[in-house]
Image (tube, rainbow, N blue to C red):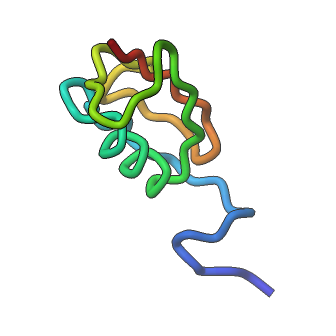
Amino acid sequence: MQKNDVGADDSVRPVEMPDVTGMSLTEAKKILKELGLEVEIEGEEKEEIVVTDQLPKKGIEVSTGTKVTIYVQ
C-alpha cells in the first residue's frame, strides 16, 4: 500500500530551503519543522533571539529529515 500523506514521517521528499535569517528563533524553528527538517541551534537559545545565519542557505534543495543549522545572537 502506498502512502500519499504529505506530512508522512517515513516519506522523503525534496524541500526548497527557506530564508529564516532575520526571523525570531521561535518562528524559524516552526517553519523548518513544518517542512520536515531537523533543527540544530548554534548560539544561546532564548525566545526573543534573532536568526543571523543558516546552513544550508536559502534556495538550496534538501530532503525532508535534513539537519539545518541556524545561528543566533
In the image, residue 50 above or below residue 37:
above
Q: Residue furthest left?
A: 22
Residue at the far bottom: name it: 1
Q: Position of residue 55 (x, y in %)?
A: 45, 18
- Side of 72 relative to 21 (left or right): right
Between 36 and 27, the one lying in front of the other is 27
Residue nearest the observer in this picture, 46 or 4: 46
Q: Is residue 43 above or below residue 8?
A: above
Location of residue 59 by image quarter: top left
- Residue at 26% x, 35% y is 24
Quadrant in which residue 46 is drawn: top left
Q: Residue at x 37, y 17 (%)?
A: 72
Would you say 40 lies left or right of 56 here? Answer: right
Q: Which residue is drawn at the image coordinates 60% and 80% (left, top)?
A: 4
Q: Nearer the viewer, residue 26 or 63?
A: 26
The residue nearer to you, when weighing 40 against 9, is: 40
